[in-house]
Amino acid sequence: MNKLVKIVALAPAILFGLGLDSKAQDFDVFTPIAKYIRIGDADKLSAWFADNLEVEIISRINDSSRSQARQIMKSFFSAYNPSAFSITHQAGKCNMKYALGILNAGGERFIVTIFVNYNNGSFQIQQLKIERLE
């Protein structure tokens, strides 16, 4: 009976320990990402990029390295200076998430889609898509 009580007491701790660590589950990865998009900081945004990712800017799709994606975003922010960005929707599971947001930049409005994946102890942007809102 004593062993059964110990097993029942330890089972939840073992089961919860098999998932992501609690910091990863509670952390809103999109808060810093949204901040860097809002201020147009491609360098700080690129710290969240995976080593290789897909970047789609106004219908131009690029499979890019982190440094190539940083340059693409620098060019975009240079051409379209951000004035506001807000996340309008987010969803996903504990290791894969996505967010949709509205970006006001250069006098135009864009919809931004961000896919992140939890890999090697951190979230990384796997895909970043920016499309004009008509």
Image (cartoon, grey):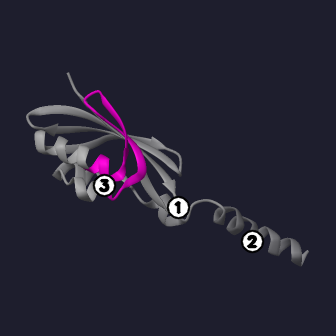
User: Mark 3 sits on what residue?
Assistant: 46
Alpha carbon separation for disc pair 1 and 2: 27 Å
Q: Nearer the viewer, residue 99 or 62?
A: 62
Badge 1 element? loop
Q: Amino acid at mark 1?
A: Asn
Who's the residue at 81% across and 75% down the image?
A: 6
Q: Nearer the viewer, residue 55 or 115?
A: 55
What crowding class fits label 2: few (fewer than 14 Cα within 10 Å), some (14-19), or many (20 or more)?
Answer: few
Q: Amino acid at mark 2?
A: Leu
Numbered mark located on residue 86 in the image = none
Give the magenta-colored segment's residue range. 47-70
The picture places residue 86, in percent across and down from the top left corner, at: 24, 44
Question: Which residue of the protein is positioned furthest toward the left in this rendering?
Answer: 107
Marked residue nearer the N-terminal end (1 or 3): 3
The answer, for residue 98, to whether it is visible in the render is: yes
The picture places residue 23, in percent across and down from the top left corner, at: 48, 65
Marked residue nearer the N-terminal end (1 or 2): 2
Numbered mark located on residue 10 in the image = 2
The answer, for residue 114, to whether it is visible in the render is: no
User: Mark 1 sits on what residue?
Assistant: 120
Who's the residue at 65% across and 66% down the image?
A: 17
The picture places residue 75, in percent across and down from the top left corner, at: 17, 43
Image quadrant containing the C terminus? top left
What crowding class fits label 1: few (fewer than 14 Cα within 10 Å), some (14-19), or many (20 or more)?
Answer: few
Alpha carbon separation for disc pair 1 and 3: 17 Å
